[in-house]
Image (cartoon, helix red, strand yellow):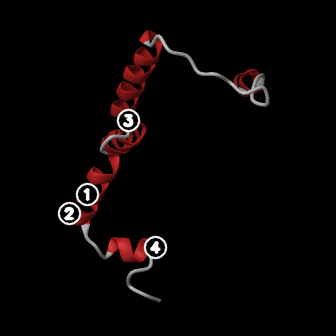
């Protein structure tokens, strides 16, 4: 297999500093990717950190003035998800 093939083993061979640099480059300009990377960092620190980040995110969503349009196929799925608890 080529050493340039994009797979886990070849990426691991780059080493931590190079991968960190690559991740920083990729998340620039993408709020969703930045949130995901931040959540992974929190998860590495423990449940308390994840909980704090989720609370911040939920507070941010409550304060937002925009809304999400839910496609007709998805409508009603939320009630099934929350009633399954």
Dot 4: element: loop
In the depicted structure, whether residue 9 falls above or below residue 80: below
Q: Whole-Å distance between the Cαs marked 1 and 4?
A: 16 Å
Of labels 3 and 4, earlier in sequence is 4
Q: Is residue 37 visible?
A: yes
Q: Residue at x 28, y 53 (%)?
A: 25
Of labels 1 and 3, earlier in sequence is 1
Q: Which x, y percent locates residue 73?
A: 79, 30
Q: What residue is disc 1 on? A: 20
**Dot 3, crowdedness within 10 Å: few (<14), some or many (≥20)?**
few
Q: What residue is disc 2 on? A: 17
**Dot 4, crowdedness within 10 Å: few (<14), some or many (≥20)?**
few
The reply to whether discs 4 and 2 touch (Cβ–Cβ < 8 Å) is: no
Q: What residue is disc 4 on? A: 7
Residue 33 falls in image quadrant: top left
Q: Residue at x 50, y 15 (%)?
A: 66
Residue 8 falls in image quadrant: bottom left
Q: Whole-Å distance between the Cαs marked 3 and 4?
A: 25 Å
Q: Whole-Å distance between the Cαs marked 1 and 2?
A: 5 Å
């Amino acid at each position: 297999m080529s050493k340039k093939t994009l797979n886990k083993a070849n990426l691991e061979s780059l080493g931590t500093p190079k991968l960190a640099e690559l991740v920083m480059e990729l998340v620039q300009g993408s709020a969703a990717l930045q949130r995901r990377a931040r959540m992974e960092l929190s998860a590495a620190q423990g449940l308390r950190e994840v909980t704090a980040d989720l609370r911040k995110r939920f507070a941010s969503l409550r304060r937002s003035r925009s809304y999400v349009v839910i496609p007709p196929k998805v409508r009603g799925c939320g009630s099934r998800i929350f009633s399954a608890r």
